[in-house]
Amino acid sequence: MEFTRNEPDAVSLMTSARSFGNYDLPGALADLIDNSIKAQARNIWITCLFNVGDPKVTVLDDGYGMTRKELHAAMKPASTNPLAERSPDDLGRFGWGLKSASFSQCKRLTVITNKDGVLSGAEWDLDNVRDWSMGVFSAQELAEIATPELRQHAGTEIRWSDCDRLSDDGAIKEEDFNDRIVHARDKIALIYHRYLAGDVPKRKTLKIFFNGQEIEGFDPFHAKHDATQELEREVLKVGRGTIVIQPYVLPHYSKITLSAYERLAGIEGFLRNQGFYVYRNYRLIISGEWFRLAKFGELSQLIRIKVDIPNSLDEVWKITIDKTDAQLPAILRYRLKQIVDGLKKRSARVYRSKGGNIDGPNAEATVWSRHAKSGEIHYSINREHPLIAALLAIDHENTRSAAVAVLDVIEQSFPVISFGDDASKRMQEIHQTVTDPHEFRRQVEAAIPLMLHEADGDFSRLAKVMKTAEPFSRNWKAVAEILKQKGWTDAES
């Protein structure tokens, strides 16, 4: 057999690189941040400017920079073998990240770097890439175009220009561009939250600045909150690597502020963000995924499971080129399914514990009352509960009579047999409380006018009454926040 060279066409391959992976703006920026982290950068400055519809993007770091030879190697397509053994802290894999991530957003990629006081620079321009012609800057050109920071200190700057995809071929409006910037900032805060919090072993805290503002890491587990349950940690050996599994059950919404709840919920909502959070070398690559081990469901919405994997298991997990997807290895499926099944019950208890009581602690006004006399047990709705009492005190006889009739019907129709059967056989599945803080807020706002009337318009008295009546007392932090936002009280949570 004879062999002949059959090299790819430069224009075709480099243009195709624009579609490698499934990059959006935060995903593309993340690949550049990975390189900065590998270069031991302590600070990373990202600038994304609308520039009248012709966006300009730069990523500057204070890492150790590259020599001319190292820069040319980094700019080479597929610069590393994905099967080659790498440093344990290496966040790369295919050697395409810098190029494919950049070209997913722009047509011209410029890199300027300083190592040991020597500047080097190179550029790929997809409009001028025939015969693999990469631009290389002279010392004079570098002296003119390098930033003062880069001329004085080690580091690397990446520039994107001719950003046709980021700008939707120049059609994007500034408002939409700004939405993308906010989304990118928030995603970076999530992806690198462990680096930003200084939680990565043998590494100092990383700082990332986005358009001049420092990014604060966002922990999807809310681990520092007192009500977050950090459950049993498990270590599994898989081939040459070790996987660490750390489950969390997040707090009930009544334990946190509405703003904290909404940030934890994200755009898709709390339900969609439950599941596994997979980290590769402490960098988040997958969030809110069950790998078909469970369904997204209300009673498991508070479960989030941190999974740490090393880069030595990339092939086993089938990490994609854009590092945004992976496949659960079959060897782990059964054990993780066991963990998930146990956790779902613990998450459900957080909501079940919010159900009403019969005898409230500390003279709490309960909704239901229990009566036992002459061998008979009877449940009734507590007419002295502040909200119910206010309803029965309405100054309209027909409305008041109708309210009494409704309460009587509810009491007489209590499903004794069905409830008894469920309580004895399926107690874990009984679920009676509101799981959405927005729905709870609607209930509170609907109840306030009626209760305020009974309190003679005294907001301080209203707050005291609500603090001793269920379900408001059990969710007092959320109620107090609503009252304060409305300016109805200065009640503290």
Image: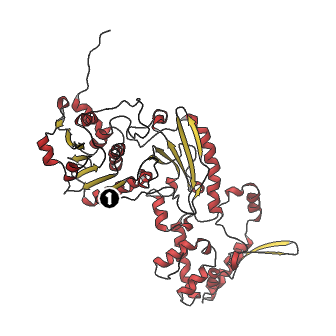
Image quadrant in which the N terminus is located: top left
Residue highlighted by disc 1: 179
Question: Where does residue 162 sit, x and y in percent of width and height?
Answer: 20, 46
Residue 68 relative to residue 366: left or right: left
Seen as rendered, the residue at the extreme front is 116
**Residue count near mark 1 (Cα–Cα under 10 Å), binned few <14, some 14–19, many ≥20:** few
Q: Nearer the viewer, residue 465 or 151?
A: 151
Q: Residue at x 23, y 47 (%)?
A: 159
User: What's the residue at 74%, 62% (across, down)?
Assistant: 419
Q: Residue at x 56, y 68 (%)?
A: 254
- Up/down of 432 relative to 63, above or below: below
Q: Identity of the amino acid at label 1?
A: Asp
Horizontal side of residue 27 vs 366, given as left or right: left
Taking the image as drawn, is residue 259 in sight? Answer: yes
**How far across and how far down the image is residue 213, in percent?**
32, 61
Q: Is residue 163 visible?
A: no
Q: Image quadrant of residue 132?
A: top left
Residue 197 image point, x, y percent: 44, 55
Q: Quadrant of the C terminus?
A: bottom right
Nearer to the camera, 451 or 128: 128
Task: List x then y, in percent, for residue 23.
Answer: 34, 44
> Looking at the image, which residue is at 54% across and 89% down?
458
